[in-house]
Image: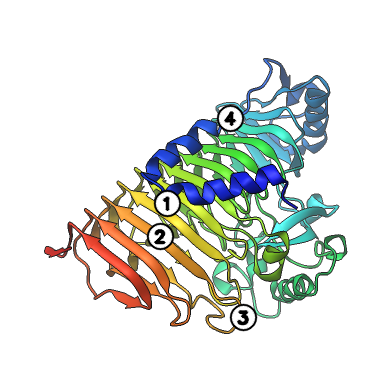
């Protein structure tokens, strides 16, 4: 449960953007997001037996180096130049996993390496599952930094076929994630204790790449992430998170770039996303599990990022049952025929939850294939549920797009309309189709143009 102080801070954070200039509130958020600092102590993994041959298992060497670093009061665990093979890496408080330029950390493609099961979250539901490739639980002051590469070695032979789709290497008759996914949904709806939701070996639920769970003061900076089994960067129930100058290139199934879930105070800046799913997807839990935890994601700043391929540039949902508020995106570049939408909101009457106070400004879009601003209450289950979503106060300013199918695609329910969408000083060119707008109260255009025709 929230403490009184946390509750008051949460209420203040929710109310602040509605008062005066919301971007001043964004500045206040950025000021209090402070990346952790570490003592000037280095623990090279080669000192603990790691070999840069790409074949010798360095899992134990990494474990020993992390343990020694934590015991000494913190510092850097250094991966030097070269190729190192490892299983899961579990960070401890005070540890900065630092990848030197020219280093590649290759993660084993053997699922057994990611056992025993750990307390994790899969598509917004808690469970005991495969360990994420880089994982921390309940730790403070942790980081993954440097100019090296994290390679999950997922492909159409390893991990991706578990999705159960032929384009990712799955063949008819082979096992896939579907049955276990259904069991997990049922368990969460029945409030089965998390420790009894054992869905690791034999369940085919792919692990996330980097997951700091219930952590505080987190930094992910500078690294390149490729070939992920599933979501790349997934801070969950975390506070004070910085993701800076990270490059993500991974086109597998559900290969979201960065998914802050049920987090407070998150800064994502200077990153490049080229993904098989949403570039950034802001979440807060799925269905009953999200409502059970009741932890919204609040105060997310996205700035100076580049989005290439993906389903959405900045996305909120679909696992949004705990709610999302106060999202600010600015000074980003988006451009690809394989990027579907710039700003995407997705929910339904099973997810429920709320999305409020979303601000986007000064975003330059070459092209997206579907819509510049896309909000859809009919995602997956649509109206077939008892939890009406609430979406309010979406503001888009100084956004330009040279090519898209349409400017707006906004579909809400008659009994749960979107409340307040404002577009100001936006220029949308080469829009092929008319906007779709269903059940939106307070749609305002001001000083905009679409295909050369002034709006507002």
Residue pointed to by mark 2: 393
Q: At 44% from the left edge and 41% from the top edge, which residue is drawn?
A: 25
- Neighbor class of circle 2 (other Cα within 10 Å; few <14, some 14-19, many 20+) is many
Q: Mark 1 or mark 2, which is nearer the start of the sequence? A: 1
Question: What is the CA distance from the residue labelled 4 to the residue labelled 1?
Answer: 28 Å
Location of residue 21 in the rendering, given as x and y in whole percent from the top left corner: 36, 44
Side (left or right) of 33 relative to 452:
right
Question: What is the CA distance from the residue labelled 2 to the residue labelled 3?
Answer: 23 Å
> Mark 2 or 1, which is nearer the eye?
1
Location of residue 146 in the rendering, given as x and y in whole percent from the top left corner: 57, 29
- Neighbor class of circle 1 (other Cα within 10 Å; few <14, some 14-19, many 20+) is few
In terms of secondary structure, where does tag 4 sit? loop
Q: Mark 4 or mark 2, which is nearer the start of the sequence? A: 4
> Mark 4 or 1, which is nearer the eye?
1
Q: Are marks 2 and 1 in contact (CB under 8 Å)?
A: yes
Residue pointed to by mark 4: 35
């Amino acid at each position: 449960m929230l403490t009184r102080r946390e509750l008051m801070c949460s209420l203040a954070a929710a109310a602040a953007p509605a008062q005066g200039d919301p971007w001043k509130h964004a500045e206040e958020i950025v000021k209090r997001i402070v990346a952790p600092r570490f003592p000037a102590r280095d623990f090279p993994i080669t000192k603990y037996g790691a070999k840069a041959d790409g074949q010798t298992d360095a899992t134990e060497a990494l474990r020993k180096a992390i343990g020694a670093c934590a015991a000494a009061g913190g510092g850097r665990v250094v991966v030097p130049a070269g190729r190192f093979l490892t299983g899961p890496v579990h960070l401890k408080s005070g540890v900065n996993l630092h990848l030197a330029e020219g280093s590649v950390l290759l993660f084993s493609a053997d699922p057994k390496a990611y056992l025993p099961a750990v307390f994790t979250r899969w598509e917004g539901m808690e469970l005991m599952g495969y360990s994420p490739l880089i994982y921390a639980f309940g730790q403070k002051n942790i980081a993954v930094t440097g100019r090296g590469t994290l390679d999950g070695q997922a492909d159409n032979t390893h991990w991706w076929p578990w999705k159960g789709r032929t384009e990712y290497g799955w063949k008819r008759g082979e096992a896939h994630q579907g049955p276990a996914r259904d069991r997990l949904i049922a368990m969460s709806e029945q409030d089965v204790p998390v420790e009894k939701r054992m869905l690791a070996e034999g369940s085919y639920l792919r692990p996330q790449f980097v997951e700091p769970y219930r952590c505080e003061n987190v930094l992910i900076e500078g690294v390149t992430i490729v070939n992920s089994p599933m979501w790349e960067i997934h801070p969950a129930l975390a506070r004070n998170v910085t993701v800076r100058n990270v490059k993500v290139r991974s086109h597998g199934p559900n290969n979201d770039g960065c998914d802050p879930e049920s987090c407070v105070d998150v800064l994502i800046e200077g990153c490049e996303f080229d993904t098989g799913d949403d570039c950034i997807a802001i979440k807060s839990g799925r269905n009953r599990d999200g409502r059970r935890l009741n932890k919204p994601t609040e105060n997310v700043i996205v700035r100076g990022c580049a989005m290439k391929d993906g389903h959405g540039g900045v996305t909120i949902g679909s696992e949004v049952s705990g709610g999302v508020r106060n999202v600010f995106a600015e000074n980003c570049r988006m451009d690809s025929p394989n990027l579907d939408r710039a700003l995407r909101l997705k929910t339904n009457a099973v997810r429920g939850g709320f999305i409020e106070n979303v601000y986007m400004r000064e975003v330059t879009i070459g092209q997206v294939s579907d819509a510049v601003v896309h909000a859809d209450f009919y995602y997956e289950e649509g109206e077939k549920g008892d939890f009406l979503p609430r979406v309010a106060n979406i503001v888009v300013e100084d956004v330009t797009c040279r090519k898209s199918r349409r400017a707006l695609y906004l579909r809400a329910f008659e009994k749960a309309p979107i409340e307040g969408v404002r577009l100001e000083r936006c220029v949308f060119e080469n829009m092929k189709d008319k906007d779709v707008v269903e059940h939106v109260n307070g749609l305002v255009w001001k000083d905009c143009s679409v295909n050369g025709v002034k709006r507002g």
